[in-house]
Amino acid sequence: MVKTPPSASSPNDPSSEKLSLSTKLAYGAGDMSAGMTTILLAFSLMIFLTQAAGLDPGLAGTVLLIGKVWDAINDPIIGILSDRTRSRWGRRRSWMLFASVPFALFFFLQWLVPHFSDNPEIDRWALFTYYCIISILFQTAYTAVNLPYTALTPELTQDYNERTSLNSFRFAFSIGGSIFALALGVVFTQLTDNPQTLYFRLGTTCALLSLLPIYWCVWGTRERYQSESEESLPIFQQLRIVAQNKPFRFVIAIYLFSWLALQLTTAIIPYFVVSWMRRESFFEVALIVQSVAIAMLFFWSKVSQKLGRKAVYFMGMSFWIVAQGGLFFLPRDRVDLMYLLAAIAGFGVATAYLVPWSMLTDIVDLDELKTGQRREGIFYSFMVFLQKVGLGLGIFLVGIVLDLSGFIKAEPGQPIPPQPDSALLAIRVAIGPLPTVALIIGLVLVYFYPITREIHSEILLKLHERKRRESVES
């Protein structure tokens, strides 16, 4: 007997409710700001700190790591607070609204190179301190905007395919924002050869433009599925329930390894393109990856409806592994092959965005079935935190590897000098074998992920039946 998928449920089943195009567009727009800012941080912050600000790679990586350690504290706190927030703007959108200006301001401040002292040593440590403080402040504002935003998904619809569709819109805007930021990088690179001027223009433009999509999302969506109970478990008890959720442990591990691979690549690709391939700018390579990824998002979403998320993840990761491994063996004079491998990688990057986040909405429903409460904020806080941990670890490891390999740093505002063979080998290992191993581990974890489409359908039916009984009894 063939089971009916959730999207084909009866009209009385809330899980079958469809969302309007305007709602999907407004929701998707909310991640455009994160797309613009995150892509510049991932691809550019490390090389900005070493090339424009003149920090050692080890210090530059430490700046990012310190910001992520703070995320270990602020992510769960903001997630729990957003769960408990009650306001006329909704418990998620109110956070997005009031944190939007600090989000843009602190992002802008990350791309300045202030002068603190004529003493180079004092100035270097003052710059290091400045970037650490700004990183902490920006990460706090980023969490206050992006974590409540990501927790909106299950509060807009309970439909299995609609949630996948929502995530397609979300990441289409996210990758679209990243493409726009990278395209600006290509344009601004043609206008100046001074790194400080380049990144100041990029940071200023993207900071200002990041405000508009947040407001679109706040005013264009409405939270509909929330727990009405005021009773709340203690924080540590909630965290223990999250940790004991077996499917969630699979999802966070899958996401951690796929995102670690992505952030290792984004952190090292500027050095790979400039030092190994001897190109002046890395923005074109990043632009190809993101452009292919956005084109594939809706394709993978359609395939997922027919074959399921596991199949999509396996297909996408297979492309990505081939591309990642190929970069290690890429000859220095084959720029054409570099662009081809970047396009192939985009097939897999799209699934890394789409599949884990779609899986997470199932976890929220399973937790509600077991506990009677919806705790999207806690689950999503772990995911957002792991996204940042992947970024922090990737950049920190790249900084340490470059330091140990004899990497020659640039003078502030000057191009990166030619590198020794030891540094070139370290760059190739960091862009090839290391991310490939992380991707393979992710594939193994997806194979054993326990929630299928059929199991999720049963979860929704049980939830619907329980709510129906409760409404009759009341």
Image (cartoon, rainbow, N blue to C red):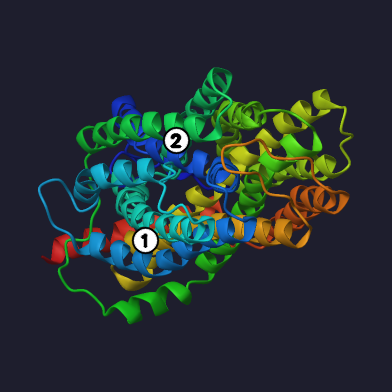
The one of 98 and 195 positioned closer to us in this rendering: 195
Q: Secondary structure at mark 2?
A: helix
Quadrant into which the C terminus falls: bottom left
**Label 2: how many Cα within 10 Å (few below 14, some 14–19, many 20+):** many
Observer-side mark, 2 or 1, equals: 2
**Label 1: how many Cα within 10 Å (few below 14, some 14–19, many 20+):** few
The one of 323 and 469 positioned closer to us in this rendering: 323
Q: Residue at x 41, y 64 (%)?
A: 71
Looking at numbered disc 1 in the image, what kind of residue is underneath it?
Lys
Give the labeled residue for mark 2.
Answer: 36
Above or below, 401 relative to 300:
below
Looking at numbered disc 2 in the image, what kind of residue is underneath it?
Met
Q: Is residue 82 left or right of residue 397?
A: left
Give the labeled residue for mark 1.
Answer: 462
Extreme residue toward the front, this view: 118
Q: Quadrant of residue 293?
A: top right
